[in-house]
Amino acid sequence: MALKLPANTKLSDIKGITPALQGRLAKLGISNLQGLLLHLPLRYLDETRIVPIRELRTGEQAQVQGEIVHAEVQYRPRKSLICRLKDETGQLVLRFLHFYPSQVASLKEGSCIRAFGEVRGGFFGWEMVHPQCRKVAEDTPVAEALTPLYPTTAGLSQASLQKWVAFALQQAAMDEILPAAIYQHLGLPAFADSLHQLHHPAANVDLASLESRDHPAWRRLAFDELLAQQLSMRQHHERRKHQGAPALAPSDKLITALLRRLPFALTQAQQRVALEIGHDLQQAHPMQRLLQGDVGSGKTIVAAMAALQAIENGWQAAIMAPTEILAEQHYQKMQDWLHPLGIQVAWLSGSQGKKERRAMLESVANGEAQLVIGTHALFQEHVVFQRLALAIVDEQHRFGVQQRLSLRQKGGQPHQLMMSATPIPRTLSMSYFADLDVSVIDELPPGRTPVVTRLVSDARREEVLERVQQACMEGRQAYWVCPLIEESEALQLQTVTETFENLQATFPELRVGLVHGRMKPAEKQAVMTAFSTGETQLLVATTVIEVGVDVPNASLMVIEHAERMGLSQLHQLRGRVGRGAAKSSCILLYQDGRLSETARARLKIIYESSDGFAIAQADLALRGPGEFMGVRQSGVPMLKIADLERDQDLLEAARSIAAELLAREPRAAEMHLARWLGHAEELVKV
Ligand SMILES: Nc1ncnc2c1ncn2[C@@H]1O[C@H](COP(=O)(O)OP(=O)(O)OP(=O)(O)O)[C@@H](O)[C@H]1O
């Protein structure tokens, strides 16, 4: 037997793959033989059968063979090449609206042709438009396997992909790495068999199961991918234990002083997670903990306590927020809480004047600033920390992985606390977040009354306006959230401005504020401060206020075109009210008559549930993990083969098998990871 090529053989080392082809394959993420092997078909063509013309059915993809009995180029109603193909059972029209002279030459009367295409009923009987045609001898054998159709990119033909994948299948070593007991127990075929079955399925395969991806061959690769992900997460977790981080002794003085000054007592859940975090910080290896808690559950105070532990030990802490508004709000809150304890809190923002910024940077560099708060401005290269021990990242799923990493790199290996109000569904926390330890605040502070959510048709806008007026006249405050217009930021700006003007005209007696993403940071801050101090009563806003804004006196929120927003986003928005003792409501205005079934179903979920977890789960099912976590933009490589929802059982299996494999067959674990590294290497870093 000829020696096989290692699967990691680079395409550049393979004769016949030109640099241009390499470039195109690289666009599909393929750089070696392994990449070709794992580039799986989207669909298949059944060219294993020749269907008699009489047995064709509309809408079916089929292969026919016969003789061209008539061919002509017609000029009316438009230029087209029309051929009649005849077999023993009937005739079929082949129609080409674009064609080359070479096609006219080969599709001439008397040629024996094999055509593949979709059948439809035409004016002259059955026809195929733009079928794939090939001249054959009458006894040319049919294909033995189904023909794979691959995802491709501009300039790369199916034929070329098919050829090179077939080459890889033939030449690449595809040794089995996993012990047979593991995959057989799961009812899965061997690795090499799976690849053969997926790329060249036999004519009698269950095509539906192959295309819906629940075929065992597909499941085997999905399992392998999930296993690699689990292995890399575990390795990462292990590696972290060997990295050094400052061991921070418990903070007796500062935390006690802070808690004594608070107007409230911590909930049980807050106390529990604060202990978990405090314990992690005492270790000499970096914490990587996710602090999860529904909107309004009180994560900020827990973050402050963690920061104090670093500060009391003579180190610096940083809090990074996803928006200026939120960073500003954290800053205000931390100032209120920590300044009286004699702690220097610094603030870095894009809106700062040069002089102020320089002073801040200096205080961060010389260690005077003990707690530093900012947006991604914190990542910039010229921000140098003197002794950073703890990086707190708010709404972590909104940040790019790169950004998170660069913050971590700012101070060797600081401890990391990630906070998220969007509960991470189980499948995600078992996969993408598997290397994180998780703390959950599963209790809201006492005295909160649940937000009453109402779905109101836009036709009843008048009533809604009355509600707003009434709430404001009673001394409370309200938000009016304008629709998200993804296609056009300009239009969104226009809408929010018009709404603001209209509301101002409708309520001359009210003080109305306006905030949107295009305002300068300083302007935004001024508006938010005016709202949080009660100076303005009604705040017209885009979704910039979605995360974290905390104005307890605001008890009414109106959201226009609620159907355009993601469920978790709506839940976040709604979480801006119901933060004080007053009974709060959230009115979801929708455009009657224009609501699709799915939109209605989604709004119903928000209406019926106030449980962020259930909402996140539904959102995940509706939008898929990429959109859900906002990671598609952030560059976290997503699983390519496995699907967390569909393959949940495999995920569970991969999790336990990863642990077993590392313990009993570390060599196999290592080889498996190496095989899937192209897929999984980024995950190692997350
Ligand atoms: N134990 C508590 N008792 C009463 N009020 C509390 C308690 N903990 C926090 N709060 C207050 O509840 C409000 C919400 O807290 P915080 O802003 O920390 O919520 P969060 O978890 O960050 O929510 P979000 O994700 O919506 O920002 C704040 O006004 C905070 O001061």
Image (cartoon, helix red, strand yellow):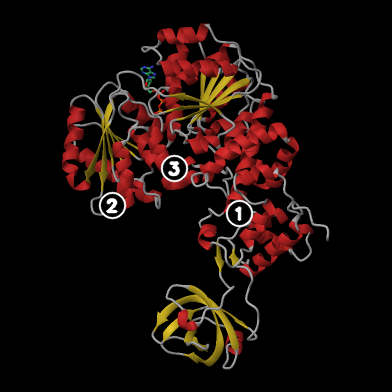
Q: Position of residue 596 (x, y in %)?
A: 30, 53
Q: Nearer the viewer, residue 446 or 141?
A: 141
Lateral position of residue 381 relative to residue 270, left or right: right
Q: Visible in this render: residue 307?
A: no
Q: In the rendered structure, which disc, 2 or 3, sits on the residue that comes first in sequence?
A: 2
Q: Nearer the viewer, residue 13 or 197?
A: 197
| Up-down relation of residue 397 to residue 247 (above or below) | below
Amino acid beneath label 2: Leu
| Up-down relation of residue 543 to residue 156 (above or below) | above
In the rendered image, the quadrant that contains the C terminus is top right
In contact (CB < 8 Å): disc 3 and disc 1: no
Q: Which residue is mark 3?
A: 620
Q: Which residue is mark 1?
A: 217
Give the spatial CA distance, label 2 vs label 1.
Answer: 41 Å
| Up-down relation of residue 595 to residue 168 (above or below) | above
Q: Which mark is residue 595?
A: 2
Amino acid beneath label 1: Ala
Q: In the rendered structure, which disc, 3 or 1, sits on the residue that comes first in sequence?
A: 1
